[in-house]
Image: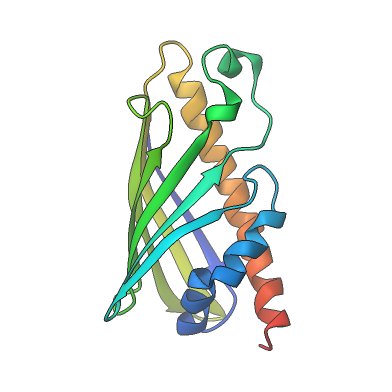
Amino acid sequence: MRFSIEQVLPGPLERVEAALLDPAFLEQMATLPKLGAPELLDVTENGTTVRRRVRYRFSGDLSPAVTAVVDPAKLTWVEDATIDRTSHRTTFRILPDHYGSRLKCSGTFVLSDVPGGVRRVLDADLRVSFPLVGGKVERAIVSGLREHAALEAAALRDWMAQQGG
């Protein structure tokens, strides 16, 4: 399933990008529902390129049809992202800790200046290989990602205001 999410984030581009990479902001993300506390595994900087790996855990509710084939306790994954701070383009892969042959997801985030803030566009491809429920799981994941993106934007606005700007 190909999908896109587009939103406008508050603030100048360099400041928004720095906030999204700030470990303190990542800690703030623990207050959002359904994903639990993200765990920063490592960050490597090489000039204007940053590689960051973060482990997430799904903590929301799932339908009985999904839990019949998926153990909610095993819904953990690592987001492996490479951020080019010159082009403001992030490429990422989702690496499931479990069910690795069942879920594939990769894509890009691109930040660009627009009047009133920064446009963030996510373009990704998500594939869930579970007979009968794969499409339903894909739609649920994309719906959750859209919800999370909106909550993250609000958290970013609040966090940047607290940081003085």
Q: Nearer the viewer, residue 145 or 43?
A: 43
Report whether 26 appears left or right of 51: right
Which of 55 and 68 lies nearest the eye of the viewer?
A: 55
| 160 lies above or below 79 | below
**Colour setting:** rainbow
Q: x, y percentage for residue 155?
A: 67, 65
Outermost residue toward the front in this view: 41
Residue at x-position 69% and y-position 88%:
164
x and y percentages locating residue 104 in the rendered image = 34, 35
Point 59% across, 26% down: residue:
72
User: Horizontal placement of 100 versus 30: left or right?
Assistant: left
Quadrant of the rendering where the C terminus is positioned? bottom right
Quadrant in which the N terminus appears: top left
22 relative to 30, above or below: below
Compared across the picture, whether 115 is left or right of 101 comes to right
Residue 126 location (% of width, % of height): 38, 36
Residue 117: image quadrant is bottom right
Q: Residue at x 36, y 58 (%)?
A: 81
Residue reaching furthest to the bottom: 164
Q: Residue 11, relative to residue 100: is it above or below?
A: below
Q: Residue 145: where, in percent of width, then height? A: 54, 45
